[in-house]
Amino acid sequence: MHVLPGSARPAAHAAREGATLSDAQSDEALLSAYAAGDARAFAELYERHERPVYRYFLRQGAAPAQADDLMQDTWLAIVRHAAQFEPRARFTTWLYTIARSKLVDHWRGRDHALSLDDAANDPEGDSPIEIDAGDAQRPDVQAMSREHARAFVDAVERLPPAQREAFLLQAEGGLSLEEIATVTNAGHETVKSRLRYAMAKLRTAMEAWQ
Amino acid sequence: MSTDRDDAPARRYREASAALDEQPSATTRAAILAAAARQVEARPKPADAPRVAQRPRWPLAAAAAVLLSTLAVMMANRTEEEQPALTASSERAPAAVAITPAPSVAASPSSGSAEPPVAEAPVSTAKRPATLAAREERSSSSAARPERRDAQGSDAANSTAPVRVAERVAEPASAESAQGPSAALPAAPPAPPRAPALARSAPAATGAVRAPDIAAGKPEASSMERASAREATPATQGVARLDEARQFEGSAPLWLERIVKLRSEGREAEADAELKRFRERYPDVKVPPAALPGGTGAGTR
């Protein structure tokens, strides 16, 4: 498990003493400050991770309303257990572990056909993803348009679940291989392989815009 | 570990996500932040956090102040109401004791038909000194009072306190003016087998003022007259009866005389009650027929 270079305690004390919250404060420091009673620290923490976690749920197949519910479940769990957070672990690892757990519970409750833990849904040699580039192929489109973005996101969503999950944990949560392995309860090499396949497919899809 | 080429899809994905601008609903956001704030408020604060004492608590303090003020006013009113009763009893008691003529009970103790003494006697001459003396006595007799309470019990002491004050004020006056048997008090009678403690308590209960009279050996029957005189005082009648009953309980003969007297006055119910208590107190003392139910004999012994 990843160990932080410094303790979060001094930052928590600083937050308690009314120090200005800034981006310089680590997630762990903000969570410790919140556990010490600083509600502003939680707001800052939530602001940082709100959209990535929400998108993580959306990309994993949740509808917007379901993603809202999952957001509430995840963040309320963090609120309840903030005092039990171990400062040596990275906050994002803990956050996405909870988020994944909520998502698995969500699909399990709905008897979803696809399970993130199902090894059968991890076809490593899957066929390449076909991406509808649309207007993105036009040379006059310089910036990524909304349609172009939607097309790329659709390509991500069409990845096999395990590859998609590994990719999202890296792209949205910024987790390392070890952290992804921890969150997904998979081996390091397994995660590395899933990521390699996912990247290859997405690169192929990207070439459509080049 | 990773090159730019490896990171390209992730970077591209982040750009695409930013372009889509997906975010949870405002309701979800508000609910999460509100829950976090509630959790902070509900969580126990660390020792160095600002304490709840900073929160204004004046409503509680105001309510307590109002309650205490109300209680103080009620107690003051009650004290003022009791004050005239004390004064009245101390005014009337000496008059009754001093003016009541030497009773027929003393002359003929067997006379059960003795008329109750005059209740309302003119006391204009003795009124003011007695009242003043009563106040002085009340303020200075705090040392003697615990002794009386020990002897008679706290309940009786509380309920008969005004009468006792009146008695103690009245006795010197009656001793000076009347010098008669009406001022005399019951001497300690020969105690029955179980009565020693009670017999000892009787003199103690009368207080230091009565000691000379007891030593002088005044007739026992005169206490009946005093008791009757006090009974007739309207202001203190109910309380005086209770006090008398306590006195009689200390002496078996006096108690029997009282029972006989009650029967002679036709107060059978009271006599029965007294007899019942007498037998509980003095189970070995023989009760004369006149004191038994239906026995309306004139004398007891």
Image: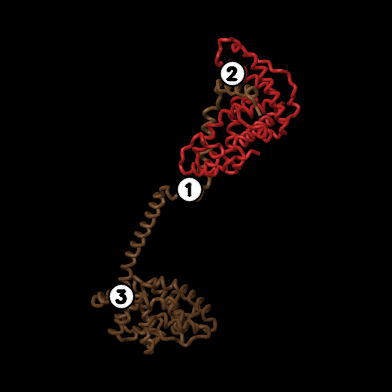
Identity, as a three-letter code, of the amino acid under mark 2? Ala
Q: What is the secondary structure assignment of the residue under circle 2?
A: helix
Identity, as a three-letter code, of the amino acid under mark 1? Ala
- Confirm whether circles 3 and 2 share one chain: no
Q: Quadrant of the N terminus of chain A?
A: top right
Residue in front for this viewpoint, B33 or B283: B33
Q: What is the secondary structure assignment of the residue under circle 3?
A: helix
Checking the image for residue B49, the label placed there is: 1
Q: Earlier in the sequence, mark 3 or mark 1?
A: 1
Parent chain of label 1: B
Chain B, hue in figure: brown
Residue visible at 67% across and 25% down in the picture: A164
Tell us which disc is closer to us: 3 or 1.
Answer: 1
Residue B39 visible from this viewpoint: no
Asked whether the residues under the numbered discs 3 and 1 touch, taking CB atoms below 8 Å apart as contact, a structural biologist would say no
Q: What is the secondary structure assignment of the residue under circle 1?
A: loop
- Label 3 sits on residue: B134
